[in-house]
Amino acid sequence: MPAADVVAVVALARLACRRSKVVEIARSAGRYVVVIAGRGSRTGLVATPGRVVALLEFGSGTIRVGIVGCGRISGLHALGYRGREDARIEAVCDTKRTRAREKARAWGVEKVYADYLELLADPEIDLVELLVPHPLHA
Ligand SMILES: NC(=O)c1ccc[n+]([C@@H]2O[C@H](COP(=O)([O-])OP(=O)(O)OC[C@H]3O[C@@H](n4cnc5c(N)ncnc54)[C@H](O)[C@@H]3O)[C@@H](O)[C@H]2O)c1
């Protein structure tokens, strides 16, 4: 991530969310997602270095994550949730259902989907990670 972009989006996030502690920052398709904590809750935003695209409100509960695509990189992403209280993997999805089941077993996840639309429709999912090949990102 370019350092100047990070400084700009973090400044935007602190201003827009009136919080100071940056918990997480990620970049996808030229946009940044910044998660900010303070006073017992988390908020955040999606932004470019010059513009706020959307504000996020996570509340104080655990963020329930759906992983779509259980290939090579998914193991690394799953590690990021280990031992955390503020986020956990709630469901996994892969068109190769056996692969999804294996990951679910390894990560202690109960919900397994083979169709990402079903995962998106699950009201118990707060955040989705798309770990599928590039042409399927949007
Ligand atoms: N492997 C790496 O080191 C690495 C590093 C950085 C970024 N990435 C990015 O992460 C993404 C995934 O990479 P990977 O290496 O894990 O690929 P992969 O081919 O190992 O895994 C992709 C998985 O997505 C599944 N999939 C395909 N279409 C699907 C659909 N419609 N619904 C649900 N699941 C579907 C496949 O069955 C497969 O299990 C890519 O965009 C890649 O560029 C990978």
Image: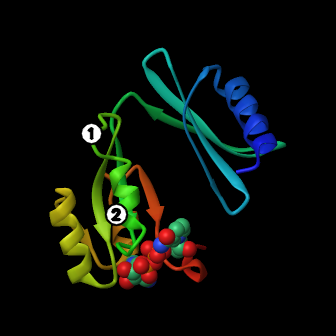
In the rendering, which numbered label is found on residue 32?
none
- Vertical order, 42 against 75 (above or below): above
In the rendering, which numbered label is found on residue 83?
1
Residue 102 locus on image (x, y percent): 19, 73
Q: In screen coordinates, is 34 left or right of 132? A: right
The secondary structure type at the circle numbered 1 is loop
Q: In screen coordinates, is 97 left or right of 17? A: left
Q: Which amino acid type corresponds to the residue marked 2 in the rendered image? A: Gly
Q: Which amino acid type corresponds to the residue marked 1 in the rendered image? A: Gly
Residue 12 locus on image (x, y percent): 75, 32
Q: CA distance from mark 1 to mark 2?
A: 15 Å
- Vertical order, 47 against 77 (above or below): above
Task: Report the number of numbered marks.
Answer: 2
Q: Residues within 10 Å of mark 2 (few under 14, many from 20)?
A: few
The secondary structure type at the circle numbered 2 is helix
Ligand 1: does it lie within 8 Å of the C-beta at label 1? no
Q: At 52% from the left edge and 35% from the top edge, which residue is drawn?
A: 57
Of residues 73 and 110, the one nearer the viewer is 73
Answer yes or no: do the residues labelled 1 and 2 have beta carbons within 8 Å?
no
- Vertical order, 14 against 90 (above or below): above
Q: Residues within 10 Å of mark 1 (few under 14, many from 20)?
A: few
- The mark nearer the N terminus, 1 or 2, is 2
Q: At 70% from the left edge and 51% from the top edge, which residue is drawn?
A: 1
In the rendering, which numbered label is found on residue 75?
2
